[in-house]
Image (cartoon, rainbow, N blue to C red):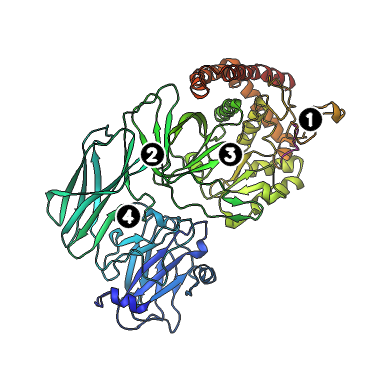
Amino acid sequence: MIPLLMSLITARMHSQPIVINEIMFHPPMERDDLQFVELLNINDEVIEIAGWRLTGGIDFTFPSGAQIQPKAFKVIAAVPLSFTKHYQSQALGPFKKKLSHSGERIALMNDADQVIDEVTYSDEAPWPKSADGYGASLERISPTIPVSTHRNWGSSNLPPQTIASGTPSAINDSFQRTLPPEVKGVSWLPEIPRPGQTLRIEATINDDHGIQVASVAFQTLTETGPSAEKLIPMTLQSGDELVGRYQATLEGFSDNTLVRFQIRVQNDESGNRFWPHPQSLKPAFSFFVTEYQSKGLIPHVLVINPSGIERAKRKYDIKASILTPEPTRGNSVFIFFQTGSNIPQVRDFVRVGRRTRGYKIRFRSRELFQRMSTLNLLDEGKPRFALSEFLSYELFRMAGVPTPYADHYRLRMDQEWKGYQLVVEQPNKAFLRRNGRSTKGNLYKLLWYGRNFIQQHEKKTNLDSGHDDIIQVVQALGRLSGDQEWRYIRQHFNVEEFAAFYAVNQCISNWDGFFNNYFIFHDTGNTGKWEIYPWDTDKTWGDFDGTSDRYDWYSMPLTFGSEGDRPGGSLSRMRRGPFGGQSWWRPPGHLSGPLLGNPGFRQVFLKKLEHLLNTVFTEEKFLPIIDSLENKLGPEVLFKYGANNSWASDTFRNDIESLRNQVKNRRNFLLKNL
């Protein structure tokens, strides 16, 4: 390795005999134990570094006898044992503190407290985003050039899956002998091209040695697949060969065509720059050429999958308690048209995966969709679910509970119209951020399956910190009672939010949402309290396993979730579910049982329920919402199932009417039993 490096790096001497050459500041899968900083001796002599220090974001002093051989590397790891196990390579360490995920200064100081080298990295553009939790590391491009700004830093090759990668103790993937040109201010006109229109692509390019050649490389993508790459030269329009505005002209494209392009530049010393870089999360600029205009009363979405749809798989194996890495980036396109609009909103290089009865769309962190990172597009197993789940989320939102975004989109997947889909945001860090919550807390998904308490509480964030907080709170609730328990609840729970959540569950007869089918969040970064968020509310509004086709079940007990409320009498006289027993019965939840059983909390809950029944869950307030849903989706039922499909039309009308009946009859039942 050393002879190869010596052949690549010129032996020039300057005031920086050792440089900071590589930084792994945000390993994926929350593996901060794999953070490292790599130094490189760019000279032809051994450098003694005993007593030298790394300061700034981390703190490490090199031990007695430490040295770096000529043209050799030295890695300093957060946890050397973890580093060696993962990379099969040795490292010094550990260092104190940890590297910031958002960026900070790192300095190399000699034993006389002189700065030998320093860099202030960032997770914001133009620094490469692929090094921010996606597996790549930050790499110095030209070690012999004393420039520490973003221009001299790139990323290592992006791994296929999100595991810590990089090039510790090896030549950087981004290595070049000279500093490459800089490309910025890329634009294209028109911004929203129509079929046949000529396009002009422009960019500002600067380089200390002069630009030798600049070009635009582009490829088109349609529902039938990608085209071959083409190269168009760029010409200097203003400025000079050191700093200039360059332009290329592309001929018009056909309708419904996505264009991906990249700027490629070479300077007079053979330094080259691809912008965006092929190892970026988004390796090309994109625009969509179309005359399409959405029709109807719901948004339209077109999805193009040139590489196919991801196979469905769990990110977290609850049986093995193992987090499996996900693909690093996608190659699909998500194109959104607002109701009645002809302006496409393009999200390129997204990931499209299959999920039960639908698709999961994952957006890149730099181009979220309406501040959301993941959408579920659901073609529900029963058409009614697309109605009841949407209305449930509406009621939770109106009650003041942080709730996933929900809507209906008409979907075209490649060349096939799928009809209207229920669209639901995935609760995750982007959801927390969108709702003004700290992303440092612990998010759990409550499951009905799983062999034990841990497996029934699927952790979604901070996976390395375990389940101690949820175990402790459940144990405390089981140990306390009365006023002492009520004080603990007020101290550790967002009482108003939990009360509103359970009150809405009562309104919509959410028999399956007390024991499981919700998210809980421990806001460890701010309030220290627990919160609760709704999820998977399809079997609601009078529906349960074994319900009648009229969905006329209005009598779920007001004490449900607290005592379980298994009805008396012989099981033989009960309506049995697919698993035997009373099909709507669930045992009290780990949280709902003690909370709803506590007199202090129950009083707050009942007041919240009464308030909802008098202000929100009323015929005057909620029936117009159901009417609006009927008007929006009525035409979509005909589009999806066919105008002559009487079963679909009749089912839709009956479902809508059952929802109206639920508002009237469930509300009356609750008012009588308050």
92 left or right, relative to 512: left
**In percent of the image, x 32 and y 70: which residue is there?**
117
Give the x, y percent position of residue 644. 53, 16
Q: Secondary structure at mark 1?
A: loop
Residue indicated by mark 1: 576
Badge 1 or badge 3: first in the primary sequence: 3
Residue indicated by mark 2: 224
Whether pointer 1 and pointer 3 mark residues with C-beta atoms closer than 8 Å, the reply is no
Residue indicated by mark 4: 277
Residue indicated by mark 3: 356
Real-space CA distance between mark 4 and mark 2, rounded to the nearest whole angstrom: 26 Å
State which quadrant residue 252 falls in: top left
Real-space CA distance between mark 1 and mark 4, rounded to the nearest whole angstrom: 60 Å
Give the x, y percent position of residue 628. 51, 18
Real-space CA distance between mark 1 and mark 3, rounded to the nearest whole angstrom: 25 Å
Magenta residues (range): 584-589
Which quadrant is the N terminus positioned in? bottom left
Badge 4 or badge 3: first in the primary sequence: 4
